[in-house]
C-alpha cells in the first residue's frame, strides 16, 4: 500500500513564515511586503512583527494569504535570547495571548495600541529559563497557535538551552536573514538534536526579513528561505492545517515534487539535484550522487522501521538545499 508523505493532491504554496514590517523594526509596510512576495511567486506570508500581533485581512487577495502572528522574545544573560513565533491556526483568532511590554521596540510601541490582548496577556513573566520558555510555548499551542523556535545560532543558544524547550511545533532549519547577516543559522544539526532527544517537531525555512538593504543587494534578507506547504486550497485553515500536519518542506532552492512510501520503500522525486541523502534516527543512511556532471531527480531506499525516523536532504549544483521533516515509523503504514 502506498502512503503519500506529501499529499498526492493539492497545490504547493510558497510561504515565508517569518517577516517584519514597519509595525515593528522592518522597513517595508505590510502592503509592500505583500507586493514583493507575490511578485516572487509566494502565496503565503506570516506577518510576525516583534511582540505585537496585528491581523492583516486587508492584504487578502485570491492569490495571496496573510497569516496572523508575532514573534516573542525572552532575553537571558550574556545576550542569550530565545525567540519564537506564534502563528494563529484560525483566521478569526486575533487575540494576542502574551505581551512583554518591556520588549516592544520601534514601531511596535504604536502598533500594540491597535492589538487585541488577552486579559491575562501581561501576567506572564519574561524569565529566561527552559521551564518558563516551555510554559510560554505551551500557552501559545493551547491558545491555537503554531509555535516555531527561531534562529538558535543568532540567539547564542546551544543544546543546554533549547534542549529544555518543549511544546514547539517546528524549528527554523534556515533563517535566511540571520544567514545574510553572517550567522550560521542553517540548523540541520539542531534539528537532529531535537529529534534524537525525542522531540517530534517539523522544520521550516523562513526569511525573517527586515529589508534594511535594498532588494537588489546580494545580501538582501528577502526570498532566500521558504516553506512549501501542500494544501487543498489557498484558504486560511487549509494552509494552517497542512502546516500542523507537516505537509510541507523547507527549501533554499531545490523542489521536492513527490514523496511516498510503499512496502517499506521510500521514494522522493525532486528538481535537478547534485546529491540526495536520507538519514535515519538510528545509524543508517542512503544517498545518491550525480557526480561532477549531470543531475539526479530521485532517491529510493528501504527504511527499516526499527530506525525510528528518517529525513531527507536535497542539494543542488549551487549548494542550495531542501529538507523534508522527519517521518516517524509509527506514522508509516505497517509492513505486510
Ligand atoms: Zn528573532
Ligand atoms: Zn524575527
Image (cartoon, grey):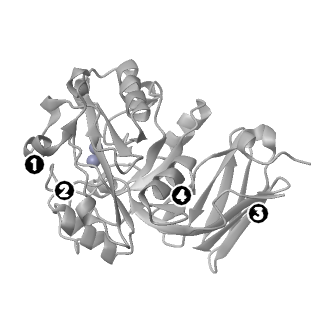
Label 2: element kind: loop
Q: Is mark 4 within 8 Å of ligand 2?
A: no
Could you tell me which secondary element the residue under label 4 belongs to?
strand
Tell me where residue 296 sits by quadrant. Answer: bottom right
Residue toward you, 110 or 193: 110
From the image, tell me which residue sits under label 3.
300
Q: Distance of mark 1 from mark 4, alpha carbons?
A: 32 Å
Q: Is residue 79 above or below residue 289?
A: above
* Residue 39 as seen in the image, left or right of residue 234: left
Is label 3 in a helix, a strand or a loop?
strand
Q: Nearer the viewer, mark 1 or mark 4?
A: 1
> Which residue is pictured at 46% across the width and 36% down the height?
168
* Label 3: how many Cα within 10 Å (few below 14, some 14–19, many 20+): some
| Residue 104, placed above or below residue 335 | above
Q: Quadrant of residue 330?
A: top right
Q: Is residue 88 left or right of residue 269?
A: left
> Residue at label 4?
249
Residue 114 % position (x, y): 13, 45
> According to the image, label 1 marks what residue?
107
Q: CA distance from mark 2 to mark 3?
A: 42 Å
55 and 277: which is toward the camera = 55
Identity of the residue drawn at 12% across and 46% down: 111
Cα distance between the residues tagged 1 and 3: 50 Å
Within-10-Å neighbours for mark 2: few <14, some 14–19, many 20+: many
Question: What residue sits 27% from the left and 20% below the top?
Answer: 127
Whole-number angstrom distance, CA of label 4 to CA of label 2: 25 Å
Residue 276 place in picture, x, y as percent = 64, 63
Amino acid at each position: 500500500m502506498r502512503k503519500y508523505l506529501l499529499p498526492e493532491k493539492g497545490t504547493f504554496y510558497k510561504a515565508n513564515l517569518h517577516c517584519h514590517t514597519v509595525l515593528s523594526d522592518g522597513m517595508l509596510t505590510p502592503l509592500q511586503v505583500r507586493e514583493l512576495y507575490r511578485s516572487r511567486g509566494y502565496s503565503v506570508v506570516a506577518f510576525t512583527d516583534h511582540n505585537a500581533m496585528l491581523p492583516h485581512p486587508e492584504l487578502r487577495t485570491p492569490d495571496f494569504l496573510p497569516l496572523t502572528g508575532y514573534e516573542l522574545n525572552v532575553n537571558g544573560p550574556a545576550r542569550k535570547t530565545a525567540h519564537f513565533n506564534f502563528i494563529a491556526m484560525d483566521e478569526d483568532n486575533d487575540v494576542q495571548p502574551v505581551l512583554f511590554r518591556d520588549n516592544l521596540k520601534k514601531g511596535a510601541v504604536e502598533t500594540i495600541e491597535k492589538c487585541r490582548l488577552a486579559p491575562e496577556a501581561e501576567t506572564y513573566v519574561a524569565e529566561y529559563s527552559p521551564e518558563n520558555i516551555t510554559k510560554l510555548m505551551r500557552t501559545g499551542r493551547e491558545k491555537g497557535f503554531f509555535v516555531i523556535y527561531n534562529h538558535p545560532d543568532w540567539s547564542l543558544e546551544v543544546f543546554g538551552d533549547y534542549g529544555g524547550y518543549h511544546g514547539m511545533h517546528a524549528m527554523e532549519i534556515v533563517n535566511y536573514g540571520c544567514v545574510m547577516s553572517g550567522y550560521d543559522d542553517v540548523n540541520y544539526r539542531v534539528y537532529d538534536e531535537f529529534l534524537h532527544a525525542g522531540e517530534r517537531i517539523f522544520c521550516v525555512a523562513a526569511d525573517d526579513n527586515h529589508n534594511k538593504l535594498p532588494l537588489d543587494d546580494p545580501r538582501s534578507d528577502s526570498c532566500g528561505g521558504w516553506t512549501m506547504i501542500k494544501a487543498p486550497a489557498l484558504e486560511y485553515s487549509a494552509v494552517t492545517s497542512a502546516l500542523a500536519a507537516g505537509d510541507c518542506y523547507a527549501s533554499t532552492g531545490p523542489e521536492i515534487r513527490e514523496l511516498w512510501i510503499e512496502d517499506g520503500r521510500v521514494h522522493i522525486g525532486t528538481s535537478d539535484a547534485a546529491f540526495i541523502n536520507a538519514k535515519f534516527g538510528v545509524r543508517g543512511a542512503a544517498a545518491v550522487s550525480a557526480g561532477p556532471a549531470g543531475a539526479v531527480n530521485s532517491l529510493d531506499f528501504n527504511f527499516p522501521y526499527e530506525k525510528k525516523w528518517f529525513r531527507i536532504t536535497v542539494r543542488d549544483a549551487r549548494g542550495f538545499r531542501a529538507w523534508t521533516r522527519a517521518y516517524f515509523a509509527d506514522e508509516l503504514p505497517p509492513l505486510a
